[in-house]
Amino acid sequence: MFRVLSLLSLLVLTPQHGTATSLQEAIAEPNLSINSVPFTTRVYWMRRANAVLLELGSPCPFSAFASVIVNHTAAGLGKLVCTGGNMNRQTGNPTLHGEITAIQNCSAILTDLAGPYKLSPARALDAFAELSLYTNAESCPMCASAIRWSGLREYIYGTSVETLVQQGWGQIRIPSLEVFRQSFDLPNPARLLGGVLTNETDPYLSWQFNPEYPCPAGCARSATTNSCVAVGA
């Protein structure tokens, strides 16, 4: 199941066998299609966000945060436009979280004169209003703000900030919902869906500070550092 939160009309949806206690816990049943996108499609793209980790070199990087940006106006499952992962350690840039990297990559792809879109900068900015960002963990306030400034149509996350804190991650404890609430001056209202496929996103982000937690598939604890490393690395 996943949470459904709209920027301008925060509608509490309750499951058949339970009651939501707050807007942050508003739960939608998995058979619902939000913005005409079925739950099975949401699952597909959240798994695709997790797969970005391996594409960047390891199934268990320490900062295992990754995003994909998708065009759901395309037929079928939609069309992948760009991906991004946390690149802090690779670049020395502390602001390159997965969402920021994905947005930057999309801007480059949309405006590439040798690429498939060949948009002007102005048209590229407008194009974000038709795109959806999937990220395997709830965005920090910086990234949630970037999502709103980008004017994205949808923002879908897996693991919550609350879970990240419980697992030992340092966080600025402002949930995405609050950032969205305070962004009412911005154009392009966005739909926020949280808690998608947490049974698959949580394990990527639960081993870093808990030596007893199992490593993600394809990884094992190092005998020297006790960190999870790719098998055969």
Image (cartoon, helix red, strand yellow):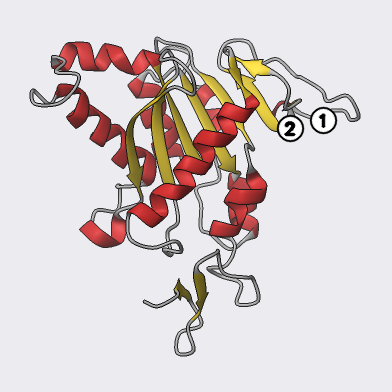
Which residue corresponds to mark 2?
Answer: 25
The quarter in which the N terminus is drawn is top right
The quarter in which the C terminus is drawn is bottom left
Above-or-below relation of 167 to 122 = below
Q: Position of residue 162 (x, y in %)?
A: 64, 48
Amino acid type, callout 2: Glu
Amino acid type, callout 1: Thr
Residue for point 76% across, 25% down = 29
Q: Quadrant of residue 151?
A: top left
Foreground pick, 162 / 182:
162
Q: Secondary structure at mark 2?
A: helix
Which residue corresponds to mark 1?
Answer: 21
Label 1 with label 2: CB-CB less than 8 Å:
yes
66 on left or right of 195: left
Above-or-below relation of 206 to 33 = below
Q: Position of residue 93 (x, y in %)?
A: 24, 53
